[in-house]
């Protein structure tokens, strides 16, 4: 409307304010009706309403509008221009982005399950005497859907908790409810194959299942059933069918001031629950396969070919869960391991894909380098703490060596940081500016990670592919194989 009333001219005559404000108001009503309110557009809303009020006043005033002094008019235009610049900045910082399209030939469907484990007490909610409950979202190969795509965020109410978790005002991320996935809700399973391998996936600490949508959709488009587990009380928020919303309580396990031994014990305690979630979810998919739990997936799951992956502590969960004999192969996306002292080495193929920053920490251990006193002061850490971390990392490196001997690999991706391994990297380009994500473009990071995950799962769950596992590839120069551990 600002453009219509100020910039567009025909000869000496400007478009009347009443016409421009009427047109802008119509657009505003359509926008609110179709899409809804978006906080990033607060100032354009205000401008539209102000101009509507002015035009209404001018229309009903019989003696016509008074000439506005040039100084006031210039100030108003300046203020409007500033508001539009601020709006452009907000739209840039918090865009309604598009997720990368899946690269496979199959369409993708999605369905969400609510599972209750009657054999396990919930230990992370002291106020509620109940059993362990999980929300699990599944992406799978589907017949072409007729409805529109499902939303990226399955439960918009949880967005205020997500914003709070990132230290942002609660309204900041509400626009994410307008982001679309590439999956159809409840679509029929594709008839391209009689059954599809199952992959269980685990988000990181304080994350959510929907932040692995692009990875799940991509695998599903290539012929996998992918189930991403919301680990209750380890997500920033999980909504259940009855409207209850749980938030993270497990952060209390890692409160500041703990000694390292207590921190490690708490991590192992949490890890035991997360690993149990994977085993229980797999139990439920066995019931779905047999028809005891109703689903489009009945009879379509290949339970003889099961994989697992995860990010951060979810990657550690993937490793620990892989000791289950029903799981054939797994992938850890930039996650340190837990329960290392309770187990022998994993004797099956496993892939570690690390960020550049995490690999630097591992390399320090490999090179027997220790932090200087100045570095410890900057980190806010102590010599004793870092010495114990180093001992754990040595054991972690030993586990990595064992997986390589079993056909696995250890990789890292240049210019990546921890959050490049989840869809949170798409939420705002500001994350890149602040160094929360790496210098690599989010779309490129996603493409590289998806390619290597798919190749590894194809090799061990479908007996095909494996090209990328043979060594460096010119198509992916940022991927570095770790040949010496």
Image (tube, grey):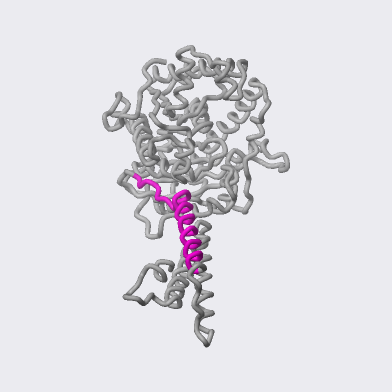
> In which quadrant is the N terminus drawn?
bottom left
Q: Is residue 99 visible?
A: yes
For this rendering, which residue is in front, 141 or 326? 141
Task: Give residue 351's quadrant in the image.
Answer: top left
Q: Is residue 227 visible?
A: no
* Position above or below: 40 against 220: below
Q: Going 47% across and 68% down the picture, which residue do you hit?
A: 28
Q: Position of residue 392 (x, y in %)?
A: 55, 18
* Residue 386 highlighted magenta (yes or no): no
* Position above or below: 54 against 405: below
For this rendering, which residue is in front, 277 or 389? 389
* Position above or below: 283 against 380: below
Which secondary structure is most common in the magenta stretch? helix
User: Which contiguous range is marked in magenta?
Assistant: 73-102
* Residue 75 highlighted magenta (yes or no): yes
Q: Going 39% across and 19% down the picture, which residue do you hit?
A: 404
Task: Count numbered badges in the picture.
Answer: 0
Q: Position of residue 327 (x, y in %)?
A: 46, 30
């Amino acid at each position: 409307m600002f453009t219509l009333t100020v910039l567009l001219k025909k000869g000496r005559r400007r478009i009347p304010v009443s016409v421009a404000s009427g047109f802008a108001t119509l657009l505003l009503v359509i926008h609110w009706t179709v899409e809804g309110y978006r906080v990033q557009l607060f100032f354009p809303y205000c401008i539209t309403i102000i101009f509507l009020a002015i035009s209404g006043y001018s229309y009903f005033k019989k003696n016509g509008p008074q000439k506005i002094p040039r100084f006031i008019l210039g100030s108003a235009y300046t203020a409007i221009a500033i508001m539009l610049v601020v709006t452009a900045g907000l739209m840039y910082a918090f865009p309604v982005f598009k997720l990368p399209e899946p690269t496979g030939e199959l369409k993708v469907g999605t369905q969400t399950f609510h599972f209750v484990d009657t054999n396990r007490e919930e230990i992370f909610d002291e106020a509620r005497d109940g059993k362990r409950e999980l929300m699990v979202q599944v992406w799978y190969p589907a017949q072409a859907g007729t409805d529109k795509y499902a939303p990226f965020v399955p439960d918009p109410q949880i967005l205020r908790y997500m914003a709070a978790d990132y230290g942002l005002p609660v309204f900041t991320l509400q626009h994410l409810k307008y982001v679309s996935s590439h999956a159809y809700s409840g679509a029929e399973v594709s008839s391209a194959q009689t059954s599809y391998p199952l992959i269980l996936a685990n988000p990181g600490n304080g994350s959510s299942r929907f932040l692995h949508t692009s990875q799940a959709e991509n695998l599903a488009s290539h012929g996998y059933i992918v189930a991403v587990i919301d680990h209750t009380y380890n997500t920033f928020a999980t909504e259940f069918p009855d409207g209850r919303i749980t938030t993270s309580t497990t952060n209390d396990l890692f409160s500041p001031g703990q000694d390292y031994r207590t921190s490690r014990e708490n991590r192992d305690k949490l890890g035991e629950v997360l690993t149990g979630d994977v085993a229980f979810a797999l139990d439920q998919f066995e019931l779905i396969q047999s028809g005891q739990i109703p689903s489009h997936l009945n009879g379509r799951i290949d339970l003889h070919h099961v994989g697992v992956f995860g990010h951060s502590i979810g990657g550690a969960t993937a490793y620990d869960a892989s000791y289950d004999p029903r799981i054939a192969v797994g992938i850890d996306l930039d996650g340190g391991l837990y329960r290392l002292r309770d187990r022998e080495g994993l004797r099956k193929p496993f892939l570690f894909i690390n960020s550049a920053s995490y690999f630097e920490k591992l390399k320090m251990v490999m090179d027997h380098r220790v932090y200087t006193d100045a570095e410890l002061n900057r980190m806010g850490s102590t010599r004793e703490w870092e010495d114990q971390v180093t001992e754990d990392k040595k054991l972690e490196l030993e586990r990595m060596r064992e997986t390589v001997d079993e056909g696995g690999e250890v990789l890292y991706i240049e210019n990546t940081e921890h959050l490049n391994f989840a869809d949170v990297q798409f939420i705002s380009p500001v994350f890149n500016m602040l160094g929360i994500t790496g210098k690599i473009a989010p779309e490129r990071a996603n493409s590289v990670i998806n390619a290597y995950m798919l190749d590894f799962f194809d090799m061990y769950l479908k007996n095909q592919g494996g090209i990328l596992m043979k060594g460096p590839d010119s198509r992916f120069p940022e991927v570095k194989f770790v040949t010496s551990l």
